Image (tube, helix red, strand yellow):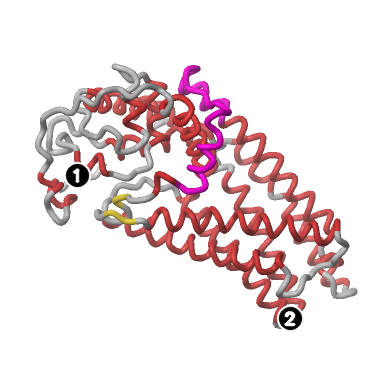
């Protein structure tokens, strides 16, 4: 099935299900989706794209809904939102199967190939033991800025395309930015979810916070290292007590822990709930996060042990994994996910939160049987998609 056809079909299915939800209102205020849905009597094709990105997959609505299968309405909002998100993210990324995607993917790895060539050339040539003699600092900096420039440009492209999808009436406002930043830092909507199993859990909140703040700490450590070297004139490598090293260790440990929990939770969710559609490149990205943290800690371990050759090799592998992580993100659904989730929440805080609350009109329905049994998924024996 073509991507355009899949996106159109999933959008139509989302419109059908949300029209049913409009007449029920049992799930009002469960998450940002429902106050947004309440703003209008009818949802538009563009709005379902926004709703999909406001859905944090708590799955409370699924377990409370009286219209899930085997009811003829067959409502499954978490599933339809997940499918729609993946279609939209795929449409916004450069897919590897496309010619232009393959060319850009190959070109972005040219700096990494150059780094390894220079490294191996200097190793065989011999010379003083110094990493920058083995690998020029200018090459490392140029490689980093190459990916950073492309990353920023591609992020702007994603936001522009997304705005055209959701319509002109949904735009973020600067006045809502402070509240949105607080929500981003706290991961406010990740608190309790039916994930990775069928009971409420904070697993997703934990690994998101670990990975998010692990990256943040590693970025701070990188900036501090540049300040020490280029401003204060303190050459690297730094002693273990240096703030750069301490912050880097903490960030690397958080990346390793978060990625291990994320991979285990994803596997458990697929096995237990059979909800997930996961691309191979997205699973590879989670493994790359793990390898970034692990190789960073390994590099430090070799350096503290005084093993200079192993330190240089481990550091180059670490830099390669960082570069590969960001390049791979450009061709997976992860980059749109990272950008559009907080951007959509900013829109929600700008447009939906300030608007007058619409009266709730709950239908008089009985909670479904799966709300009262130990394993609700087994209650319905839902067929696979």
**Range of residues picked out in magenta:** 159-187
**SS for callout 1:** loop
Which residue corresponds to mark 1?
383
Q: Residues within 10 Å of mark 2 (few under 14, many from 20)?
A: few
Nearest to viewer (mark 1 / mark 2): 2
Which residue corresponds to mark 2?
307
For the C terminus, give its image quadrant: top left
* 80 in the magenta segment: no
**SS for callout 2:** loop
Q: Closer to the camera, 92 or 221?
A: 221
* Residue 120 position within the rendered picture, expressed as x and y whole percent measured from the top left: 79, 67
* Residue 21 position within the rendered picture, expressed as x and y whole percent measured from the top left: 23, 27
Q: Earlier in the sequence, mark 1 or mark 2?
A: 2
Quadrant in which residue 358 is drawn: top left
In this rendering, the answer to whether 143 lies above or below 177 is below
In this rendering, the answer to whether 212 lies above or below 334 is below
* Residue 356 position within the rendered picture, expressed as x and y whole percent measured from the top left: 36, 22
Q: Residue shown at 34%/21% (left/top)?
A: 39
- Are the two marked residues, 1 and 2, in contact with CB atoms closer than 8 angstroms? no
Quadrant in which residue 313 is drawn: bottom right
382 vs 177, left or right, is: left
Q: How many marks?
A: 2
In this rendering, the answer to whether 107 lies above or below 164 is below
Q: Residue shown at 84%/65% (left/top)?
A: 132
State whether the magenta stretch is mostly helix, strand or loop.
Answer: helix
> Which mark, by number, is residue 56?
none
* Residue 47 position within the rendered picture, expressed as x and y whole percent measured from the top left: 39, 23
Q: Residues within 10 Å of mark 1 (few under 14, many from 20)?
A: few
């Amino acid at each position: 099935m073509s991507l355009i056809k899949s996106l159109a079909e999933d959008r139509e299915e989302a419109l059908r299900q949300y029209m049913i939800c409009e007449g029920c209102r049992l799930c009002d205020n469960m998450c940002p989706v429902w106050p947004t849905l309440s703003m209008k009597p009818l949802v538009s094709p563009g709005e379902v794209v926004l709703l999909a990105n406001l859905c944090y997959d708590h799955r409370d609505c699924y377990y409370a809904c009286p219209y899930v299968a085997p009811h003829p309405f067959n409502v499954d909002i978490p599933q339809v939102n997940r499918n729609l998100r993946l279609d939209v993210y795929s449409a916004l990324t450069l897919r590897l199967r496309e010619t232009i995607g393959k060319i850009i993917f190959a070109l972005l790895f040219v700096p990494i190939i150059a780094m390894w060539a220079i490294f191996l050339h200097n190793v065989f040539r011999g010379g003083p033991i110094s990493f920058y003699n083995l690998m020029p600092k200018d090459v490392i900096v140029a490689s980093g800025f190459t990916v950073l420039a492309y990353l920023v440009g591609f992020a702007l492209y994603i936001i522009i395309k997304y705005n055209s999808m959701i319509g002109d009436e949904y735009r973020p406002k600067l006045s809502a930015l402070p509240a949105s930043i607080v929500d981003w830092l706290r991961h406010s909507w990740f608190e309790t979810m039916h994930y990775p199993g069928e009971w409420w859990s904070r697993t997703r909140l934990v690994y998101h916070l670990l990975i998010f703040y692990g990256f943040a700490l590693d970025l701070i450590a990188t900036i501090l290292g540049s300040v020490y070297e280029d401003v204060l004139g303190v050459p690297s490598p730094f002693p273990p007590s240096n703030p750069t090293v301490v912050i880097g260790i903490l960030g690397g440990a958080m990346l390793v822990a978060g990625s291990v929990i994320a991979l285990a939770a994803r596997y458990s969710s697929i096995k237990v709930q059979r909800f997930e559609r996961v691309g191979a490149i997205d699973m590879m990205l989670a493994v790359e996060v793990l390898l970034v943290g692990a190789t960073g800690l390994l590099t430090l371990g070799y350096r503290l042990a005084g093993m200079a050759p192993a330190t240089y090799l481990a550091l180059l592998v670490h830099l390669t994994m960082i570069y590969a992580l960001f390049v791979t993100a450009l061709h997976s659904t992860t980059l749109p996910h990272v950008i559009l989730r907080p951007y959509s929440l900013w829109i929600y805080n700008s447009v939906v939160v300030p608007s007058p609350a619409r009266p709730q009109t709950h239908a008089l329905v009985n909670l479904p049987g799966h709300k009262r049994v130990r394993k609700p998924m087994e209650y319905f024996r839902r067929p696979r998609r």
